[in-house]
Image: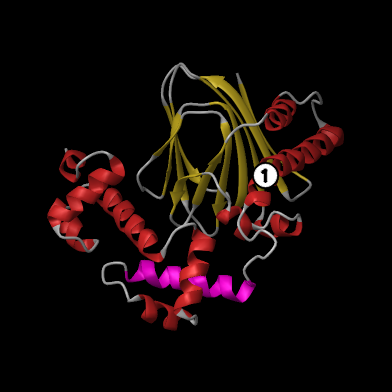
Amino acid sequence: MFAWSRKVGGDLMVSAGSAVLRENLEVRAPIFQGLQVIVSLNSRLKGGVDGYAPFDIEESGAYFVLCTGEHDGLDRFEANVLQRHVRIGIDADVAERSGFSLDLVARSGGRRLHSQEVLVLHQPLTSALRAAAMQILYCPFKDGAVRDLFLGAKGMELAAAALARPLAQCPGAGDALPAGEVQRLWRARDLLIARAHEPPSLPELAREAGLNAKKLTAGFRRLFGMSVFEYLQQHRLEEAYRMLSSGGCTVTQVAAHVGYAVAHFSTVFRRRFGISPRDLLR
């Protein structure tokens, strides 16, 4: 049973752990800002971001976490289960310089576990990933410059192995969105969230963000992996879950806050989370 974390070369955070917990463990901590590549060899836990609905991590695989700004993370580890993982944290600027475009990572395939301000993606575990993760987990060097050199090289190798296929298969991988357009799309997304209770029309949103409706529609899907309407609906429901789970509000109040009639709200909420709003309040 062990866990360790180390900053390598000033640019890379490498951490790893292997444990079987006697009791359930809840860990709350700020989320690393930039790109994280997490290889789960064995895990059973729930992850969460900023109080939104938790998501399950119950299978081996590569998990990509893209975070800008300050956000709070939650991990709830299950007892009596072997938990083994390796985590690589790469600063956003370093990731871009290393060829790991965050725009392309955001548009890559895989299962989306969370896609609000922080994006969490899951990809299957490959033999190359497993091998690189095991070499980091059981690093043969105990300390000093040689250990740092080994972990730095293996950390970048693991990140490259995890991202190579998703980035190669990403639509438009050879034709990334221009930086100015990405900035305007993020502005559109921020405007959408700020006015989620009374959202602007698509032409209004495009005009305020400095885009035309066609570029907004196509670019938004490329950057965020879903349409403007789908993103808005997901944000509303995630916000509703956070409010209901925090207590202090009725279902009617929450539905009104996120812009739904109560009957329709209950239907879409159950479809999204598998539980009714009233059951969550209990």
- Give residue 55's position: percent from left, percent from top: 41, 39
Q: Is residue 202 left or right of residue 158?
A: left
Residue 254 visible in the snapshot: yes
Query: Which amino acid does the dot numbered 1 rest on?
Result: Arg
Q: Position of residue 145 (x, y in %)?
A: 85, 37
Say if 131 sits above or below 52 in the image: above
Q: Quadrant of the C terminus?
A: top left
Local SS, label 1: helix
Image location (x, y in percent) of residue 279:
17, 38
Q: Position of residue 198 (x, y in %)?
A: 26, 72
**Residue at (62% x, 42% y) in the render:** 37
Coloured how?
A: secondary structure
Question: Residue farthest to the right?
Answer: 146
As rendered, which of 77 and 126 lies closer to the eye?
Answer: 126
Q: Residue at x 79, y 47 (%)?
A: 9
Quarter placement of the N terminus = top right
How many numbered discs? 1
Compared to 193, does 142 lie above or below?
A: above
Q: Is residue 181 magenta?
A: yes
Depth check, front residue: 151 or 131: 131
Q: In screen coordinates, is 183 left or right of 272?
A: right
User: In the rendered image, which quarter is residue 264 located in?
Assistant: bottom left
Residue at 60% x, 57% y is 171
Q: Kindly report the secondary structure that dominates the magenta region of the rendered protein.
A: helix
Report the front residue among 262 and 144. 262
Q: Which residues are magenta?
A: 178-195
Query: Which residue does the numbered mark 1 point to in the structure image?
Result: 165
Q: Residue at x 56, y 55 (%)?
A: 106
Q: Is residue 182 magenta?
A: yes
